[in-house]
Image: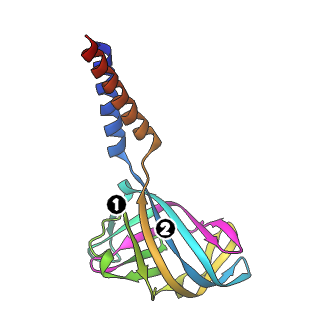
Amino acid sequence: MKFFQMFGCLAVCLGSLASVQATPISYVYSGTGTGTLGGTPFTDAAFTITGTADTTNIAAWAATPGGLQNPHLSTLINIEGLGESSITTPVHSWVGSGTIGGIGKNLGPNWITFNEPAIAGYDLANAIGPIQEDNPSNFLQFSNVATTGGTLAFTSMGTVTLTAIPVPEPVSVTFVATGLLLVAGQKRLITRD
């Protein structure tokens, strides 16, 4: 029984420690747009941009006083009819000190800017959305972007929706689940005695 107590406590503690160290998050931007990818035109095509980041990388953003930015570890874009490509230009998601936020080249141009009250005070670390922006701005700066499918450029953009989804790490989930199972098993053994 002592073994179950010690191992259960250890697993729960390690699981909690692992989940504190890093939390992956996905920022998902979906909408419609017109432009070109690798020289191939698309018109009013549905697109989804998924940026995967780590919440431990969130930092103050000097370009926006009072704002925050989180550089993406990877960014994928899927354009209807053209498939999925990786954006190889460094990308970040950001929020300003007021009701603005969006996605853009890391420490560079803002590609899609939201101006919505729902984004005010967002910390980039937790779930949010869906937040809809009917008139996204800065999309003309979303040009000459390097991707695995060729150069990407938008010339117009319709409504865009932002959803942020924290992703639990499999390792920490496994540790916590193992710890809980062992504690439950230990409790049954104590009850039988």
Crowd around label 1: few <14 · some 14–19 · many ≥20 (10 Å): some
Q: Position of residue 125 (x, y in %)?
A: 34, 60
- Outermost residue toward the front? 192
Residue closer to the observer: 44 or 140: 44
Residue 166 point in image, percent of width and height: 40, 56
Tell me where residue 14 sits by quadrant: top left
Q: Real-space Cα distance between discs 1 and 2?
A: 13 Å
Q: Is residue 77 left or right of residue 5?
A: right
Q: Nearer the viewer, residue 21 or 59?
A: 21
Q: Which mark is residue 40?
A: none
| Colour pattern of the rendering | rainbow
Residue 55 higher or lower than 121, as above or below: above
The kind of residue tagged 2 is Val
Badge 2 element = strand
Q: Would you say 174 lies left or right of 62 here?
A: right
Q: Magenta includes 85?
A: yes
Q: Quadrant of residue 126?
A: bottom left
Q: What is the span of residues highlighted in magenta in the rendered image?
A: 72-100
Tell me the kind of residue under disc 1.
Answer: Asn
Residue bearing the label numbered 1: 126
Mark 2, other Cα within 10 Å: few <14 / some 14–19 / many ≥20: many
Q: Secondary structure at mark 1?
A: loop
Sequence-first disc among 1 and 2: 2
Residue 120 position within the rendered picture, expressed as x and y whole percent measured from the top left: 28, 76
Front residue of 32/85: it is 32
Picture coordinates of residue 57, whole percent (x, y): 38, 57
- Residue at image x 64%, y 69%? 147
What secondary structure do most residues of the magenta stretch adopt? strand
At horizontal 32% and vertical 45% (from top left) the residue drawn is: 20
Q: Which residue is mark 2?
A: 28
Q: Please name the residue shown 32% across and 14% down the image.
A: 3
